């Protein structure tokens, strides 16, 4: 994984009012946990450019008053209206101890199903995985070249050396879905062809065609035949 840096300062006070005062100044309250104790600090919003505002998942070296902590971002909170970053949680990385992170999903190649008119659907843009930090890749790359229409890659199909995918094995990550154009191409008969009658189907008079109804008192051929039998 790539390593990025972030500089901040330790918080003298911890509380809601202090956190709000920091946000007014354009600073973000943060916490590092997973070590011997929780470390509360703050950093300028601009420091998070390569931490949060990026599709990649990175190791974050946080420098606080001359001491550096090796971490990974665990959670970020944003204001509901302004969409500004208002809090960030970091997990301290300890050698030999597995960590849980979200890795971005990247597809490789063009699926056969897409060439045939299907549509590629990426259901999960990130995967939650767990493993040692030195085993974690920058992203999860999925080769989709052999994926045909109606087929998918599930979480259980993804094998990463030394890493556990923390999703149900049957959940779909990426698939090729059939499109309306493909359905119409299959269902619509070619010009000049006729469809075969369905077994057991009965003929229905065309619209406007005349149908014969026996006149009042008239006997049908079947009734006449029955009358002859009685006379005999």
Image: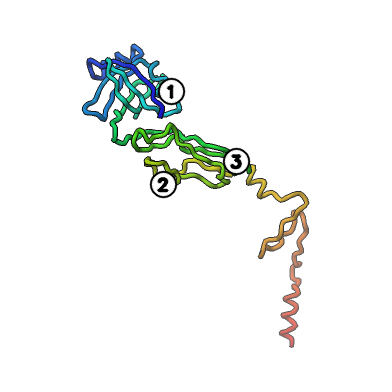
Evaluate whether residue 166 shows in this view.
no
Q: If you read the primary sequence from the N terminus, does the residue marked by circle 3 or circle 1 appear first? A: 1
Structural distance between the alpha carbons of marks 2 and 1: 30 Å
Residue 52 percent coordinates (x, y): 40, 24
Q: Which mark is residue 114?
A: 3
In the picture as drawn, the residue positioned furthest to the top comes out as 25
Residue 27 percent coordinates (x, y): 34, 15
Residue 135 percent coordinates (x, y): 37, 36
Q: Is residue 39 left or right of residue 81?
A: left
Q: Which residue is mark 2?
A: 169
The residue located at (52%, 40%) in the rendering is 143
**Mark 1: secondary structure:** loop
Q: Which of the pair 44/57 is nearer the observer?
A: 57
Image quadrant assignment for residue 118: top right
Q: Which of the pair 228/183 is nearer the observer?
A: 183
Mark 1 crowd level (few <14, some 14–19, many ≥20, 10 Å Cα): few
Q: If you read the primary sequence from the N terminus, does the residue marked by circle 3 or circle 2 appear first? A: 3
Structural distance between the alpha carbons of marks 3 and 1: 30 Å
Q: Is residue 177 above or below residue 199?
A: above
Residue 179 percent coordinates (x, y): 60, 42
**Mark 3: secondary structure:** helix
Q: If you read the primary sequence from the N terminus, does the residue marked by circle 2 or circle 1 appear first? A: 1
Q: Which residue is mark 1?
A: 53
Q: Kindly indicate whether the residue at mark 1 contacts the one at mark 2 (C-beta within 8 angstroms).
A: no
Q: Which of the pair 178/94 is nearer the observer?
A: 94
Q: Is residue 198 left or right of residue 4?
A: right
**Mark 2: secondary structure:** loop
Mark 3 crowd level (few <14, some 14–19, many ≥20, 10 Å Cα): some
Structural distance between the alpha carbons of marks 3 and 2: 24 Å
The residue located at (33%, 24%) in the rendering is 88
């Amino acid at each position: 994984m790539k390593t990025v840096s972030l500089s901040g300062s330790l918080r003298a006070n911890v509380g809601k009012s202090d956190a709000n005062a920091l946000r007014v100044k354009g600073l973000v309250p943060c916490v590092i946990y997973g070590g011997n104790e929780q470390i509360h600090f703050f950093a300028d919003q601009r420091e998070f450019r390569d931490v949060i505002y990026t599709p990649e998942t990175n190791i974050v070296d946080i420098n606080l008053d001359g001491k550096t902590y090796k971490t990974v971002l665990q959670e970020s909170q944003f204001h509901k209206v302004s969409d500004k970053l208002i809090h960030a949680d970091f997990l301290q990385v300890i050698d030999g101890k597995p960590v849980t992170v979200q890795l971005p999903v990247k597809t490789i190649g063009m699926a056969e199903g897409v060439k045939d008119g299907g549509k590629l659907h990426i259901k999960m843009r990130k995967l939650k995985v767990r493993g040692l930090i030195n085993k974690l890749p920058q992203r999860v790359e999925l080769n989709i070249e052999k994926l045909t229409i109606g087929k998918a890659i599930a979480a259980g199909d993804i094998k990463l050396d030394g890493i556990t995918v923390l999703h149900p094995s049957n959940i779909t990550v990426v698939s090729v879905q059939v499109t309306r154009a493909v359905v119409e191409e299959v269902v619509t008969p070619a010009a000049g062809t006729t469809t075969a009658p369905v077994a057991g189907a009965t003929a229905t008079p065309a619209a406007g065609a005349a149908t014969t109804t026996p006149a009042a008192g008239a006997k049908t051929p079947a009734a006449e035949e029955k009358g002859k039998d009685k006379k005999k």
